[in-house]
Image: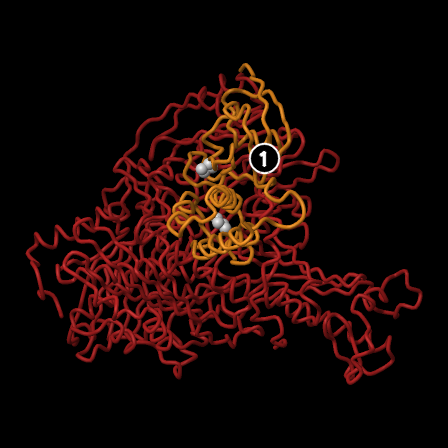
Chain colours: A red, B orange
Amino acid sequence: MPPDGLIGQALPRVEDERLLRGAGRYVDDIHPEGCLEAAFLRSPFAHARVTNVDLSEAVRAPGVVAAFDGAQAAALAGPLVFDMARIVPEPVRRSVDPLVRVQPMPSLATDRVTFVGQPVAMVVAESRYLAEDALQLIDVEYEDLPVVVDPERALEPDAPLLEPEWEDNVAIAFNFRKGDPDAAFAAAHATVEERFRSHRYMAAPIETRGVVAAVDPFDGRLTVWASSQTPHLLRDFLAGALGYAPDRLRVVAPDVGGGFGMKGSIYPEDLLVPMAARELGRPVKWIEDRAEDLASSTHGREQVHRIALAADADGRILALRDDIVHNAGAFTTLGLVVPYNSLTHLLGPYDIEAVDVRMRVALTNTGVTAPFRGAGRPETVFAVERAMDRLARELGMDPAELRERNMVRPEQMPYATGLVYRDGADQVYDSGDYPGLLRKARELVDAEELLAQSSEERRIGVGYAAYTEGTGVGPFESARVSVEPGGKVIVRYGGASQGQGHRTTLAQIAADALGVRFEDVEVRGGDSGELAQGFGTIASRTLVLAGNAIVEAATEVRERAKRIAAEMLEISPDDLELAEGAFSPKGSPGTKLPLGDVAGFLSPFNPARPKGESADLAAGSIYRPSTVTYAAGVHAVVVAVDVATGMVELLRYAVAHDCGRVVNPTIADGQIAGGVMQGIGGALYEELVYDDAGQLVTGSFLDYLLPTASEAPELRLAHLDVPSPLNPLGVKGLGEGGAIGPPAAIANAVEDALHELGVVVREGPLGPSRVRELIREAVKAGHGKVNTVGS
Amino acid sequence: MAEVDIRLTLNGEERSASVEPRLLLSDFIRHHMRLTGTHVGCEHGVCGACTVIVDGEPQRSCLMFAVQADGASVETIEGVAPNGELGPVQQAFHEAHGMQCGFCTPGFVMSLTALLRNSPDADDDELLDSLSGNLCRCTGYVNIIEAARLARERMNGAA
Ligand code: FES
Ligand code: FES
């Protein structure tokens, strides 16, 4: 393990100054000479046959250079085929024998549209204004087809089919069983069964998506700048779809204004804009507008769980059953990822012996759902953690106490759940103290005094949510560390930053592993031109994977430099120390040989350079984790509910978190705070609503409500970090964790506040009108006043 | 479309241009003046990323046409600390880690700069009111609120 020097220090971020001066370089800030701009005509219907697309007037409009329909696009570039989505590791196949059907997505609709916002035609013009003018001149003939929006309805035998050649709308299905759940339910002292729904909301980064593409007129190479989390994956995809050798194609993710999973997907525009640039021989840009983002960028969540728990009289959970329906939207682009995450995070921190889960993923005429911060975990945690509270009430137990009684104990680590993770490895929690996290969260939220202020009109409740999170999924990430002759260290990594502060944290890691000063390290990422191989920043993986790749590469550089320095100083390598970027013989810190001089010594211009050594002081590494490492957290929140208005106020929010060894506490806490706020948004304000005809009702920020500073609660954070034994740095990922707990914790707190009224919370968001409705219904159902349910 | 001549002061410099009447001020600043620090997050007046200071008041540049800025004095993020040290609001965002991706940051800095110039002793409610006009999707606001308080303290100290 590298020394603790810089790791764990709250160093200020190196990326800030540029961004604060307005000198960031986001995709719309890139405007090559002669750049054209694209605009898309999108389907106004959720399901229709496209019988004719007439571009003839649009192409003659002022400033228009070209227009494309689905047939033209299909002739120039392949459809979007998500090969990776088809991969099912053999152990996963053995464990759950999944059905996985992945459809190719046309870049522009050809004969059919299947969701509102699906791109149908593209216009390229001298400016965005002119391109949008021309969209209005395109004539498309549609023939209505029957629409299905609700995923449960989509599974009924007479539901309209999204894919006419399929016999049903099931894109993915699997079952998992362990132990003897039937016997456990039969023998149980208490059981609960409920239907919980995790509603649809989305990442909505403040910077929308965007793509700029330019072909070099001299050598024909294509450069694509995209607001993407995965530039290398996009390069590989584009190389295939456009028929480029990967080395003739460079994808750059410049500064990216937030991603949260949404920018880890590949979209039709990512393909169409480079295609147009190639066809037209001029740079082309497209920047998504907010209406497009809400309708056409990937959404998150939307699962219905029919979940049941069986427990003995002591509150020991004997079995869990869950029948899950997941709404994929109109296409499955990432296959098992989200639904399978829901399975492997269903048991969370709990030790439950008998389990029976069925998952069905339905296609519907709605926008595509894909990973969004948490990616299947918040959905599943909402169901399980709500069920825990129902069970606690049934048993007359304190919900925190019930949780603690069922948690995997630290001495059970490493703990095998009996499931297989998505990467094909047995699911084994590597480390963690779940009861400790719970106690910490409880202590932090310090609910008693607040609860005492509860009144008939303003009812106060407390809620918890506990979760685990497999982080740092493979297959790999790459890094390269090089020492320049001046002593500057350049670290290249295969991921990309969307605000996580990689240039700071990865520099801390590199500086420590190498033995140089933090200021001398420059981190470069998000550019397939900098490093041939890479995977990208998704799934809370960069710190774990790129971090450890950097440690490996830096260690190799350090050892090699030491050997050469020893030759230069004519002493044994064992007698050398490297600190602050210079070697010194042990015991004589006054003598210094800077690392930059060692790099310079290797220069081909140096006649005295050692024979047989390569000319650069650099090393690359590809880090492949054996499997994921398990972060965990417990959230606790106290809410006040105004019974008359239905308004929910968050009085205090506490998070106890385990993300392994922390590299930069300020940045780590910032990640958690941001995730929590996105979860709060989902719990209380944000919902993507479709009407029965498949029209998106929440098509702007006036209807899709993001939380503002006024909604930020008092936030108390604590770390209970248990270093992961699975990687040299001991780190676990943490990008997503914060967003997993809030929907469940807040729903639990609201139900707790209103339990005397008999309210049961089955779905969010818990805006005033829904809360009022819950209260009205409960009162109408005669749950009446006081002490009717539980204690 | 017929173009209209406009003259305005942009970050202290006299500028003139011919623009279409429908050109948004945000597009004029970003694409015609090439000052790309002003960002566009929604183009319908909600996110505040496009905030600039027009004649001393914070304005959403996506809700104004460039022609409406004729004769006005417009200040963008590039004008807050043209060279040398960061301004006090910028410095506070850095120190309090009030930013992650940085896309919303110029908008916040402009809103807050205008507020604290006009009312340096704004109380916490006024601060929060002003901050609530800008959306951030990364930070969860906690550190932005912290940064706003820090900036207020510094600007008061300096006054
Ligand atoms: S871009 Fe102007 S308010 Fe969002
Ligand atoms: S820092 Fe990313 S939106 Fe605010």
Q: Quadrant of residue A414?
A: bottom left
Q: Is residue A630 above or below residue B78?
A: below
Give coordinates of residue B107: x percent, y percent. 50, 43
Give coordinates of residue A508: x percent, y percent. 62, 66
Kindly identify the residue that appears in the image at 59 percent across and 64 percent down. A11
How many numbered marks have been drawn onto this rendered protein structure? 1
- Please indicate, yes or no, whether residue A69 appears anywhere in the rendered image: yes
Q: Which residue is mark 1?
A: A275
**Extreme residue toward the top, this view:** B2
Q: Is residue A53 above or below residue A5?
A: above
Helix, strand or loop for disc 1:
helix
Kindly identify the residue that appears in the image at 27 percent across and 45 percent down. A150
Q: Quadrant of the N terminus of chain A?
A: bottom right
Residue nearer the viewer, A289 or A120: A289
Residue nearer the viewer, A286 or A169: A286
Q: Amino acid at mark 1?
A: Met
Give coordinates of residue A164: x percent, y percent. 34, 39
- Please indicate, yes or no, whether residue A83 appears anywhere in the rendered image: no
